[in-house]
Amino acid sequence: MILCSRGASGLRGVTGVLYSDPVTLTAPPRLLLVHAHPDDETLTTGGTIARYAAHGVHVTVVTCTLGEEGEVIPEGLQGLAVDHADQLGGYRVGELRSACAALGVADHRFLGGMGRWRDSGMVGVDANQHPRAFVVGDPEEQVAALEAVVREVRPQVVVTYGPDGGYGHPDHVRAHEITTEAVRRVGGVDRFFHTVASRSETEAGVRALAEAPGLPFRLPEPGELPTVADELITTAVDVSGHLPAKLSALRAHATQVSVWQDGAGHASYALSNGIAQPVLGHEYYVLADGDPTGVEHDLFGGLFGGRDADPQGPR
Ligand SMILES: [Zn+2]
């Protein structure tokens, strides 16, 4: 918030008009999300991005790698994979662009520029040692690259994963580490959130899918999907009005995600492991730093002096 206060003589605003009364200029809400690979922005926060972008929030997404090590689902695109042409990263840039367009993201960046750091793969694979692997990269350089974005964008709210990266992927853990440090160094960020999945809502979603005839994916075993206990969750963002955008963005990541809808209200997606995941009406967050007042249903709730950053509310 930029407060223009002045004495009796008044101050000239940028247009040269002499103000006679105090005027409060409010900075537009800005949301920065830091993700490890193309598709993570949609899988974990796609509804949230679509909702805030639709309501005029300036949404910036930073992606740390090109996702070169991903497995490829469509048969006809298998040749892109790392053990064939190794062209998946470049291909996924296009998928990410389409997803960002579906979600309404106007400001997307790759950390350090496109291709600076490479997908490190899952824990223990050879790709962890690649000279450009994100986890091999100098954390100082990575923090500095993100710090520059934070200083430029000046987001009130920043989102990334929790300390375990959500499900333990080394690049997600590194994204958490560098984002935490960049936010600490820059200061001035009002709230820092970790994106998480609600245990109870995920389980309810899986139960609903179990009743859905024709589901082409295998149902997860209890505890197989990464979730957190609901008592840890501080914020549930209603994204039910933005699921068409999220589903479009999921479909854009066709090398990584299969999407299923039955026309009767059921929707699910699966990664290359073929495990059914529910598409839920809320996305969930843990407030890691910042004022919790008003945070229950809105990442920006209460930050604007009582004026809702999301004035149209859920839709
Ligand atoms: Zn990822």
Image (cartoon, rainbow, N blue to C red):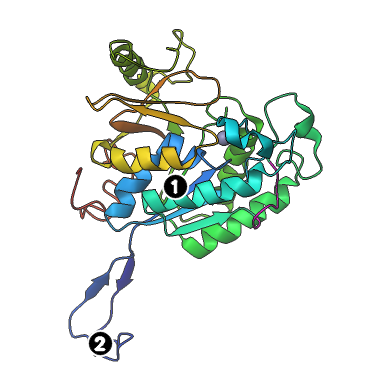
Q: Earlier in the sequence, mark 1 or mark 2?
A: 2
Is 79 within the magenta?
A: no
The location of residue 123, given as percent across then percent down, is: 70, 25
Considering only vertical position in the picture, is 220 above or below 154?
above
- Which quadrant is the N terminus positioned in? bottom left
State left or right for residue 189 relative to residue 22. right
- The kind of residue tagged 1 is Ala
- Which residue lies under the disc numbered 1? 99
State left or right for residue 216 relative to residue 140. left
Residue pictured at 18% horizontal, 85% vertical:
20
Q: Quadrant of ligand 1?
A: top right
Rendered image quadrant of residue 296: top left
The location of residue 55, given as percent across then percent down, is: 26, 54
- Comparing 239 with 151, the one in front is 239
Query: SS of the residue at dot 1?
Result: helix
The location of residue 238, given as percent across then percent down, is: 26, 36
Residue at the extreme top of the image, as rendered: 222
Residue pictured at 50% horizontal, 19% vertical:
274
Is the residue at mark 2 in contact range of ligand 1, meaning its CB lies under 8 Å from it? no
What range is drawn magenta here? 112-118
Please name the predominant secondary structure of the magenta segment in the image: loop
Q: Specify whether residue 49 is in view.
A: yes
Residue pictured at 33% horizontal, 85% vertical:
14
Considering only vertical position in the picture, is 270 above or below 147?
above
- Which residue lies under the disc numbered 2? 10
- The kind of residue tagged 2 is Gly
Q: Specify whether residue 289 is in view.
A: no
The location of residue 315, given as percent across then percent down, is: 19, 44
Is 113 within the magenta?
A: yes
Query: SS of the residue at dot 2?
Result: loop
Of circles 1 and 2, the one toward us is: 1
Residue pictured at 55% horizontal, 56% vertical:
109
